Image (cartoon, rainbow, N blue to C red):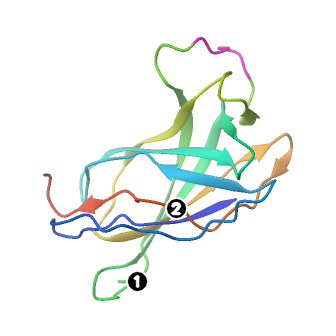
């Protein structure tokens, strides 16, 4: 399981805050990078996230992962009861690559083998602001319990489109 504290923030617009949380980066740890952009509350859309193995340079590719989203609060600190939802994310290779169509996964791969993200369609965030996502993947018969955060910018759920 990868618990990713991500900022799906900027509740009503304005500047995007810089979110930095320390992720565990040892061997056997998973890290996640949110690749979604322009997420808007109460609108269905695709949520995408890239997964990689700590500081080992290997990516997670193929198959599908389970994503769970939890509302953790707004700018005032109100968690609003903590909405929760789950979705299955399937591997989406970056276009133009030659990837094995029958490859089993998810599994760790070198970036030269396959690069991509996991996408969950029809995800609707019921309110703007701060959310957390957990990604669960069974890799080679083992559940990974990885890092607890991401470094850098998170995705943003706004109250209206830009």
| 1 or 2: tag closer to the N-terminus | 1
For this view, does 159 lie left or right of residue 57? left
Left-right relation of 87 to 147: left
Q: Reply above or below: 58 against 4.
A: above
Q: Quadrant of residue 81?
A: bottom left
Q: Nearer the viewer, mark 1 or mark 2?
A: 2
Q: Is residue 137 magenta?
A: no
Residue 151's spot in the image, x, y percent? 52, 61
x 15%, y 66%: residue: 14
Measured from the top left, where is residue 161 in percent x and y? 14, 52
Name the one closer to the observer, 80 or 37. 37
Q: Secondary structure at mark 2?
A: loop
Q: Residues within 10 Å of mark 2 (few under 14, many from 20)?
A: some
Q: Quadrant of residue 12?
A: bottom left
Query: Looking at the rendered structure, which numbered label has been put on residue 151?
Result: 2
Chain part drawn in magenta: 98-103
> In this orientation, which residue lies closer to the viewer: 119 or 27?
27
Circle 1: element type: loop
Q: Which mark is residue 81?
A: 1
């Amino acid at each position: 399981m990868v618990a990713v504290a991500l900022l799906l923030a900027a509740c009503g617009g304005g500047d995007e805050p810089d979110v930095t949380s320390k992720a565990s980066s040892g061997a056997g740890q998973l890290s996640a990078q949110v690749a979604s952009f322009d997420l808007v509350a109460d609108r269905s859309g695709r949520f995408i996230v890239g997964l990689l193995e700590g500081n080992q340079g290997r990516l997670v590719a193929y198959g599908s992962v389970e994503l769970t989203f939890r509302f953790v609060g707004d700018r005032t600190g109100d968690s609003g009861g903590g909405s929760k939802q789950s979705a299955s994310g399937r591997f989406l290779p970056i276009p133009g690559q030659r990837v094995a169509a029958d490859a089993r996964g998810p599994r760790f791969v070198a970036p030269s083998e396959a690069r991509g993200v996991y996408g969950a369609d029809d995800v609707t965030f019921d309110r703007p602001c701060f959310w957390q996502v957990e990604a669960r993947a069974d890799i080679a018969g083992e559940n990974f319990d990885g890092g607890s955060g991401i470094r850098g910018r998170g995705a943003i759920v706004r109250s209206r489109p830009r």
